[in-house]
Image (cartoon, grey):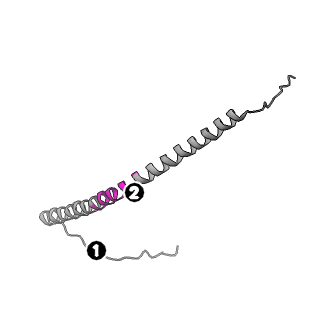
Amino acid sequence: MQYQQIEFRQIGWRGKLGLILALALGLGIVAALAIVSLGIAILLLPIVAVAALVGWFRWKRIVSAARRDAEERRREQGEHVIETDYEVIDRGR
């Protein structure tokens, strides 16, 4: 079996400074992306809400028009629909 040896070498002050700067840059980029995405979401929220509301009203109008057309066709063809409540009774076999 082959053993691997891991060595940690000492990091000088330039290496520590580079790590600190890289960490600060990474956190800054993450924070900036979070702020930009949150801003875009806040800007798009009213647009999506208005579009959903308009779509809902259009959908209701389409459904009511289809219902009216179906009722008119039934009347023209002389079909009568009788709605009633019924209950299935078991014969007790």
Residue at the (22%, 60%) spot, across then down: 62
The secondary structure that dominates the magenta segment is: helix
Q: Image check: 87 left or right of 7? A: left
Q: Quadrant of residue 47?
A: bottom left
Name the outermost residue toward the front.
13
The front one of 69 and 23 is: 23
Residue of label 1: 83
Q: Image check: 3 left or right of 28? A: right
Residue of label 2: 42
Q: Label 1: few (<14), some or many (≥20) within 10 Å?
A: few
Residue 49's place in the image compared with 40, above or below, is: below
Residue 82's place in the image compared with 14, above or below, is: below
| Comes first in the chain, label 1 or label 2 | 2
**Is residue 26 highlighted in magenta?**
no
Part of the protein shown in magenta: 40-53
Give the total of numbered labels: 2
Residue at the (29%, 60%) spot, across then down: 50
Quadrant in the picture for the N terminus: top right
Residue at the (64%, 41%) spot, across then down: 20
Name the outermost residue toward the top.
2
**Is residue 50 highlighted in magenta?**
yes
Helix, strand or loop at label 2? It is: helix
Q: CA distance from mark 1 to mark 2?
A: 49 Å
Q: Label 2: few (<14), some or many (≥20) within 10 Å?
A: few
